[in-house]
Amino acid sequence: MSDDNVRRIWTDAELDAALAAFNADVRTDERVIARARATLAATAATTTTATTTTATATTATATAATATTRQETDVTTTHESRPRRSKRRWLAGAAAVAVLVAGGLVVQTVSFGRRAPATAEAVATLDRAAARTIGAVDHEVGPGQYRYVATRAWWMASTGGDQGEFARLVENVLETWVPADPRAEWLLRRDVTGNQRWVVGTEEQAKAAGVDTRGGWPEGEWRAPCGEFFAPSPERRCAEAGSWQHPTAEWQAGLPTDPDALFERLAADAPDDRGDAELLVYAADALRSGLIGKDVRATLYQALAKLPGLEVSEQRANLDGRTGTALGIDDGSRRQEIIIDPETGRFIGERQVATDDSGGFKAGTVLTFTSVTTGVADAIGQQPTA
């Protein structure tokens, strides 16, 4: 038997992914069975060299993470400090599985309930986007100029009462001007446009029930150095170390340049309340900022190709007239997605879709989506001319 036919040893990230599902409620689920078959077939097709030629079965216990709902944050907490993931728990129990493939014996170690790896289609899409990103040119912001980042966000507003449940997507437009010197003054402008898309109930029904349908988010302009518009005190501004939600140049410079190491960093920083889906949320937080340099962006795409369960959910997803490929991961009730243009490597936006009937929403309901555009403006408060 050749070493080329032996399943490689799992990385820390793969073991962590297995833990997230190890003690989940067990039931006969054809989708889970199908994913298990896909994982087995994908493993049999790989030709990675392992360090051992035998598989040993051991026993252990593990604790599954509890999935919770991620709420869209208000503008006052755009740069919120999210909790770190709990320390990695080791999976000591696995089942030794031997299968015959094309007449050859393939020995592998499989953890029951482990999420399948990213699909080949998702990996190919991200690899192409990374290659295009590396070859792209980041528009430089010269003296007196500003990087302009516009986010058009449709966020869900839900209201319940004695006369029923109501929900609508409300359009918010956020524009940010970032100076060439990030320690200088930034400008944030936010507008709740009044455009709404009713998802549960109608506006007439909501008004008849006494529901306020005017929006509920703050509007206006905020200015502050370092983009820390809501620092608790002026002296605390420019003191933040940077994060996935506020990716300063110094923070980006400290990120690993190897995709495997960057994936480990992402897994360590993201909280595990939604398992692997939260890693995609954190990546989207950074990409949405419009401040990620092309080298970091390319490495991040390559790192996301290692995300278990990632798949192409729509080849031509349309966000406010811009079309890209949607890549998503399902946490059991919602699918978290990022949308990128694989031909240019540009991040277009993100989307969250219900995948089961719960919380008053039908499966397939778009719960929130954002589109992002960037450019260079010649003056603060002005939009780019080209």
Image (cartoon, rainbow, N blue to C red):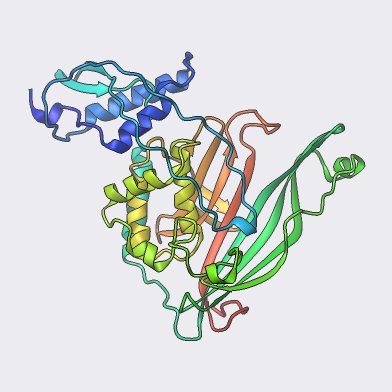
75 on left or right of 108:
right
Is residue 350 in view? yes
Q: Where is residue 98 in the image (x, y as percent from the top left)?
A: 20, 16
Instruction: Look at 24% across and 22% down and name the residue there.
Output: 109
Instruction: Look at 60% across and 77% down and name the residue there.
Output: 383
Q: In which quarter of the image is the C terminus?
A: bottom right
22 on left or right of 220:
left
60 on left or right of 287:
left
Q: In which quarter of the image is the N terminus?
A: top left
Q: Where is residue 237 in the image (x, y as percent from the top left)?
A: 53, 69
Q: Where is residue 140 in the image (x, y as percent from the top left)?
A: 41, 77
Q: Is residue 191 above or below residue 168?
A: below
Q: In this view, does 147 lie above or below 84?
A: below
Frontmost residue, 131 versus 94: 94
User: In the figure, residue 96 lies in which quadrant?
Assistant: top left
The total of numbered circles placed on residues is 0
